[in-house]
Amino acid sequence: MFYVAVDAMSGDLGPRPAIEGTVQAVREWNIPVILVGNEEILTRELKKYEYDKDLIIVENATDVIRMDESPSKAVKERTNASVVVCANLVKKGEAIGFFSPGNTGASMAAALFYIGRIPGVHRPCIASPIPREDGGTTILVDSGANVDSKPEWLVQFALMGSLYAKEMFGISNPRVAILSNGEENKKGNVVSVQAAEQLAKLPINFIGNIEGRDLYGGTPRYADVVVCDGFVGNVVLKATEGLASTIFRILLKGIEDSPLAKTGAFFLKPVLNEIRKRMDYSEYGGAPLLGVNGACLIGHGSSNAKAFKNAIRVCYDYAEKQISYKIQELFPKKPGIFKFLD
């Protein structure tokens, strides 16, 4: 069977959401899962649920890498940490991919150290889905893996992101753009300008620069894949999440303070629930690390059961669709030269 390894111990909420989400994934999609963590705790919690016992295995891991630890040092020295055990299961072929809601740097380091980079890929990147006004989804790459980037890295992020959008979201000809401080060709820093010049020469649907206001749709200049370095991408992602939560809190407070608003909210409840669902990160589960030689999904520290369930599905689909193999086909073993241009 093709198992997905789940780091059940690294999340902020403890192992319960991991167990509940895993059971839901097994019940709904029959996806086999290896739960990685403290064997005694996980086994005891699993006894509370009814599920197909053949589809969930517990792998003991007695250690957890904390959020404030140095990722690379911890991954190399703490071989019994849950995220390291997950990555090692993929390396040994016992799992097809893994999901961790813990230290993002540790997840990346474990994936690189144990699973390895796809030959020809300069740097892996995190591809985060962001909902758009038109009902579509924008893939933001990179959203945190590489704080400093080179132009050729951004070009590879664009190509990997475009492939991911095609394979996982069914977008036949993804619109690819660079996030910049203006739409004009020469706007941006040196890295983004040079990357745009290279992307314009490639056989992809590159539309040039877009600004931050275009990221969420609602303007004619939208993109399915938006490229930036990991510093900018992570700031954008966290600001987006924070703004969405703030807007809902302000809206709810306004409703509570007004009897008339409460009446209107009653009739708008289905619409409000749909908006909340669209903005809920747990609907996506997590963000894949594109460019490693296997499926590695990175999640929020506060991942709930729904996030775990959906992350397991995304991880399984990623492996089943052979995304890593298809990324490898984009590039030759020598970095920097694109196979389809040879």
Image (cartoon, rainbow, N blue to C red):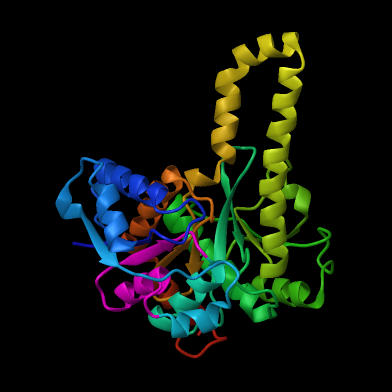
Please check the rendered image and state whether residue 85 is part of the magenta-colored stretch, yes or no: yes
Residue at 57 percent of width and 57 percent of height: 128
Q: In this view, does 70 lie above or below 7?
A: below
Q: Where is residue 205 in the image (x, y as percent from the top left)?
A: 60, 61
Number of numbered discs visible in the structure rendering: 0
Q: Position of residue 78 (x, y in %)?
A: 43, 80
Q: In this view, does 105 lie to the left or right of 296?
A: right
Residue at 62 percent of width and 37 percent of height: 134
The image quarter in which residue 293 lies:
bottom left
Nearer-the-camera pick, 62 or 340 = 62
Q: Can residue 195 be seen by looking at this rendering?
A: yes
Q: Position of residue 137 (x, y in %)?
A: 56, 47
Q: Is residue 155 above or below residue 40?
A: below
Magenta residues, as a range?
79-102
Nearer-the-camera pick, 88 or 112 = 88
Residue at 82 percent of width and 68 percent of height: 188
Please check the rendered image and state whether residue 229 is part of the magenta-colored stretch, yes or no: no
Of the 4 image quadrants, the one containing the N terminus is: bottom left
Q: Can residue 31 be seen by looking at this rendering?
A: no
Q: Where is residue 55 in the image (x, y as percent from the top left)?
A: 20, 53
Q: Is residue 340 left or right of residue 38?
A: right
Q: Is residue 130 left or right of residue 329?
A: right
Nearer-the-camera pick, 226 or 64 = 64
The image quarter in which residue 210 lies:
bottom right
Residue at 62 percent of width and 17 percent of height: 268
